[in-house]
Amino acid sequence: MVNIAPYKVDGTLLGEWIPAEAREVREDNTSRKVDRLLDHKYGLLKKKHALASAIQGRKKYTVLELKMGEEK
């Protein structure tokens, strides 16, 4: 069980905390899809962070599936 909330990039809370369930998704096709979506949304900024992560030895993202409220 986790609690999630919408927030600004600076961490300012924009809404109420919502209880949810989280699980790690380990399917390769899901990881590739998330990678493409991040590329599309963040472009060069995402590539910069991916390069920094690779230099530090962290090459893979952790993908979480969240189920909130009545979706549980």
Image (cartoon, rainbow, N blue to C red):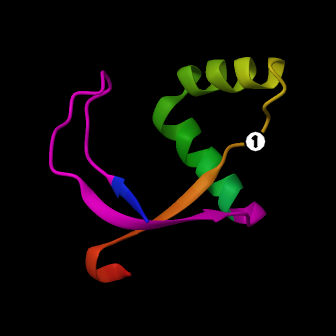
Query: Was residue 18 drawn as part of the magenta stretch in this picture?
Result: yes
- Name above or below for residue 36 compared with residue 23: above
Q: Nearer the viewer, residue 22 or 59?
A: 22
- Name above or below for residue 60 compared with residue 66: above
Question: Start and end of the magenta stretch?
Answer: 4-29
Q: Residue furthest front?
A: 1
SS at circle 1: loop
Residue 65: give x, y in percent of width and height. 52, 64
Apparent side of residue 21 relative to residue 4 in the rendered image (left or right): right
Q: Nearer the viewer, residue 38 or 24?
A: 24
What residue did someone put label 1 on?
A: 60
* Residue occupying the point 80% across, 25% down: 54
Q: Nearer the viewer, residue 15 or 32?
A: 15
- Name above or below for residue 69 compared with residue 54: below
Q: Say which quadrant the C terminus sits in.
A: bottom left
Residue 47: give x, y in percent of width and height. 65, 24
* Residue occupying the point 68% across, 43% down: 61
Residue 14: give x, y in percent of width and height. 16, 39
Query: Was residue 26 drawn as part of the magenta stretch in this picture?
Result: yes
- Give the amino acid at mark 1: Lys
* Residue occupying the point 73% across, 24% down: 53
